[in-house]
Amino acid sequence: MNNQSNTLKNLESAFAGESMANRKYLFFAEVAQRLGFKDLAKLFKETAAQETEHAFAHFELLHPELAIADPSTLTDEEKLKIASQCLHLAIEGETYEYTTMYPEFAAAARQDRDAAVSAEFEAQIQESQEHAEIFRRAAHRFGLLTPIEHHHADRYSEALNILQGGTASEKQITQKWICKQCSLIYDPIAGDPDSGIAPGTAFEDISEDWYCPICGATKKMFVPHLEAIVA
């Protein structure tokens, strides 16, 4: 599915809508329960469960790599890969929340002089950071350190080495990247001549407007590729 397609955007909107409906109906169920309307509360809960099924169906289309038809047919390596991707997406989402989304929302609320909303967003910054850290610890505990974390760790070590007078390592220069959408692997040794990317070009040196030659995904849709998962 093309990363710029209307279908992808519609799927993302549908998933967000169904997810929001689920939480909203559960909130309504709690309100109805507290007011003594047990049958109404039950109705809201049942409908919330249906919205969850809808959201799951949309999410599987957005992330087919996580769809599991029969777990018994999967190898241990395949199971690790799927679990690792789940943790990666969780860490990515929580990190975005505490580094970008909530800080920007809190700043806008302060500008609007809405102290209550600003306080709520500020509290969520801390919680999202804690959630991200919990997922990171889980990744380490289960031997599922995600590719992006491996990459960041390598980048920090690389930067320190260069600051101390060293040079870029062979590993960074040859690090392969994989498209999360279609699984195309960018190999810096081969480059992407058809797109004007010369052989020997590290992924970090590719222009930000480059896109996957197979599915059209943007550069941001690529993550470092591990040849094997280390348990």
Image (cartoon, helix red, strand yellow):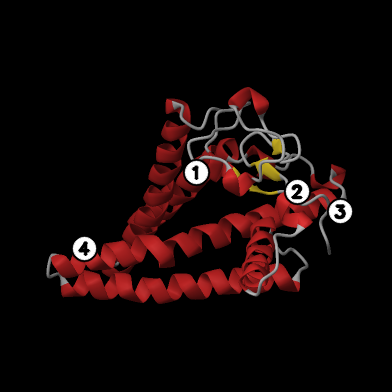
Question: Which residue, given by chain and number where applicable, does mark 2 sit on?
Answer: 174
Do the numbered discs 2 and 4 sit on residues whose CB atoms are within 8 Å? no
Q: Using a 10 Å C-alpha cutoff, classify the residue at mark 2 as few (fewer than 14 neighbours), some (14 to 19) or many (20 or more).
A: some
Do the numbered discs 4 and 3 sit on residues whose CB atoms are within 8 Å? no
Q: Label 2, label 4: how many angstroms apart (C-alpha)? A: 42 Å
The quarter in which the C terminus is drawn is bottom right
Identity of the residue drawn at 70% across and 59% down = 168
Q: Amino acid at mark 4?
A: Ala
Q: Secondary structure at mark 3?
A: helix
Q: Using a 10 Å C-alpha cutoff, classify the residue at mark 3 as few (fewer than 14 neighbours), some (14 to 19) or many (20 or more).
A: few
Q: Label 2, label 3: how many angstroms apart (C-alpha)? A: 27 Å
Q: Nearer the viewer, residue 143 or 196?
A: 196
Q: Secondary structure at mark 4?
A: helix
- Earlier sequence position, callout 2 versus callout 1: 1
Report whether 32 appears left or right of 206: left
Q: Using a 10 Å C-alpha cutoff, classify the residue at mark 1 as few (fewer than 14 neighbours), some (14 to 19) or many (20 or more).
A: many
Report whether 68 appears left or right of 37: right
Q: Label 1, label 4: how many angstroms apart (C-alpha)? A: 30 Å
The quarter in which the N terminus is drawn is top right
Identity of the residue drawn at 20% across and 74% down = 116
Residue 155 percent across, percent down from the top left: 64, 63
Q: Secondary structure at mark 1?
A: helix
Q: Nearer the viewer, residue 60 or 214?
A: 214
Question: Which residue, given by chain and number where applicable, does mark 3 sit on?
Answer: 76
Can residue 38 be seen here? no
Q: Residue 108: give its label.
A: 4
Q: Secondary structure at mark 2?
A: loop
